[in-house]
Image: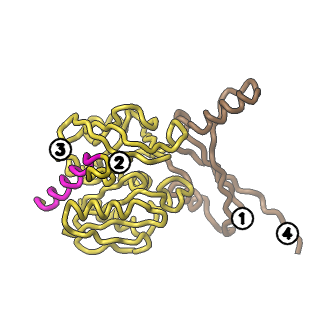
Amino acid sequence: MKVRVHVSLKPGVLDPQGRAVHHALEGMGFAGIEDVRIGRLIELEVAEGTTDAALDEMCRKLLANMVIENYRIEKLPQIERAA
Amino acid sequence: MRLAVITFPGSNCDRDMAVALEKVSGTAPIRVWHGDADLPERLDFIALPGGFSYGDYLRSGAMAANSPIMRAVKEAAGRGVPVLGVCNGFQVLAEAGLLPGALMRNAVQTFICRTVPLVVENAQSLFTGGYTPGQEIRIPVAHHDGNYFADEATLDRLEGEGRIAFRYKEACNGSRRDIAGILNETGTVLGMMPHPERAIEDDLGSIDGRALFESAIKGLVGA
């Protein structure tokens, strides 16, 4: 099973990287940008029986830092591979 | 006296830390590798050095915080064994939950490497008893992720309980309330971004870090 974990900074946590990219985009002439926040995408390939609880624990204990980050788990539909 | 310095893959201040501890205590610390499951017995002091453990993968200190030796360090800290974490060591302590908050990318986006003035906020802890309250000291910083973050309630609690050990005298890296170093509830775990081990001799440009080690070692002898 393929799982994507989207890690993002909590609202209210300053994102200096996002701010720098925001300024860069504006400097390139792109208008109308309200905000830029940078997160992290982690793709996992896990055994079929992996429980939601186990995935949650992986996120809380390592993949995200709960002091500053939120996470969202996305399970990707299985794509049948041709034999 | 039994002192230990933990080395993670990517630590690069472990030797400086060991030298500082030996110069002040007269005892060479035991060097411990991160993959060891157990700490040496009857330790009196544990130091987590600066560097870039695991290449700062995922988040600074995140991988090291979950390495085998950290289970033993957490257990020792729980028994009251003093733990000092400097720079990456502070990041590891925060990631391991031994200290509150997190160290984020510097607000200025650049690596900061210079000697900065600090104000000693708490001069009564095991680590800071050799300073006077409000004393200004000069200690080098060298980090990319030293921007201390915690929510307002946690910051208020740290202030109220006298757990802010050091503050930057001038804004440095974006840290909330200019926090440079904090203590745990019992005052036996100190995490700080500046490097006291790089300020123990005149030849290094400052001797202001020496009092931290002297105070800690004196406290151990007295204990």
User: Quick check: is B214 in the magenta stretch?
Assistant: yes
**What residue is shown at x 67% (from left), y 69% (from top)?**
A47
**Residue, disc 1:** A1
Image quarter of the N terminus of chain B: bottom left
What type is the residue that disc 2 sits on? Met
What type is the residue that disc 1 sits on? Met
Label disc, if present, on residue A81 of the rendered structure:
4
Q: Which chain is brown?
A: A
> Badge 2 sits on which subunit?
B
Give the x, y percent position of residue B73: 34, 64
Image quarter of the C terminus of chain B: bottom left
> Badge 3 sits on which subunit?
B
- Magenta residue span: B206-222
Label disc, if present, on residue B124 of the rendered structure:
3
**Residue, disc 2:** B192
| Location of residue B119 (image quadrant) | top left
Mark 4 surroundings within 10 Å by alpha-carbon count, few (fewer than 14), some (14 through 19), many (20 or more): few
